[in-house]
Image (cartoon, helix red, strand yellow):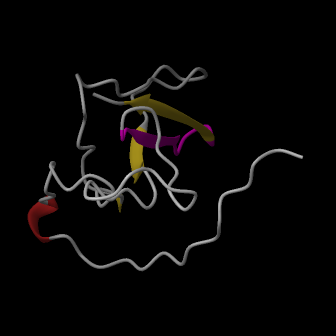
Amino acid sequence: MSRQLPAFRIVADPLPQDLLDRTALGQRSKFGGRPTWEQEDETPTCPDCSKSMVFVAQLDSIGFDPAKTVGADEYIFGDVGLIYVFFCFDDGKTTSVFQCT
């Protein structure tokens, strides 16, 4: 059986002016706004219509705490990276992009 992540409740709180602390590793998940890229902009294009896809969310590494060593309750994406999710409203296609430092 493949590894399964624990379930977490998602609570959406408005983020004033799309501001996010880029240094708050493990706390940079968000929905909407603009991606907080770790590296350069990698906004994908839809494979069907070739338009830029719309940013939906970014998911940060789960349970990361810089004060602790990595434990069983942490799920670190690369080097405390982010997974970015995109959607094409015209064609119903989704894709994701992964970046880390």
Answer above or below: position of 93 versus 63.
above
Q: Is residue 53 left or right of residue 33?
A: right
Q: Residue furthest right?
A: 1
Count of all numbered marks drawn on residues in the image: 0
Report the residue at 33% width, 58% height from top. Answer: 68
Report the residue at 44% width, 31% height from top. Answer: 98
Q: Quadrant of the C terminus?
A: top left
Q: Residue furthest front?
A: 69
Q: Is residue 43 shown in magenta? A: no
Residue 4: x, y in percent?
A: 73, 55
Residue 86: x, y in percent?
A: 47, 41
Q: Is residue 94 left or right of residue 66?
A: right
Report the residue at 25% width, 25% height from top. Answer: 41
Answer above or below: position of 89 versus 9.
above
Q: Is residue 49 left or right of residue 28?
A: right
Q: Nearer the viewer, residue 54 or 21?
A: 21
Report the residue at 30% width, 61% height from top. Answer: 27
**Magenta residues?**
80-92
Q: Is residue 81 shown in magenta? A: yes
Q: Quadrant of residue 53?
A: top left
Residue 19: x, y in percent?
A: 12, 59
Q: Nearer the viewer, residue 63 or 96?
A: 63
Residue 74: x, y in percent?
A: 50, 56
Q: Quadrant of residue 84?
A: top left
Answer above or below: position of 99 versus 70.
above
Q: Nearer the viewer, residue 42 or 101?
A: 101
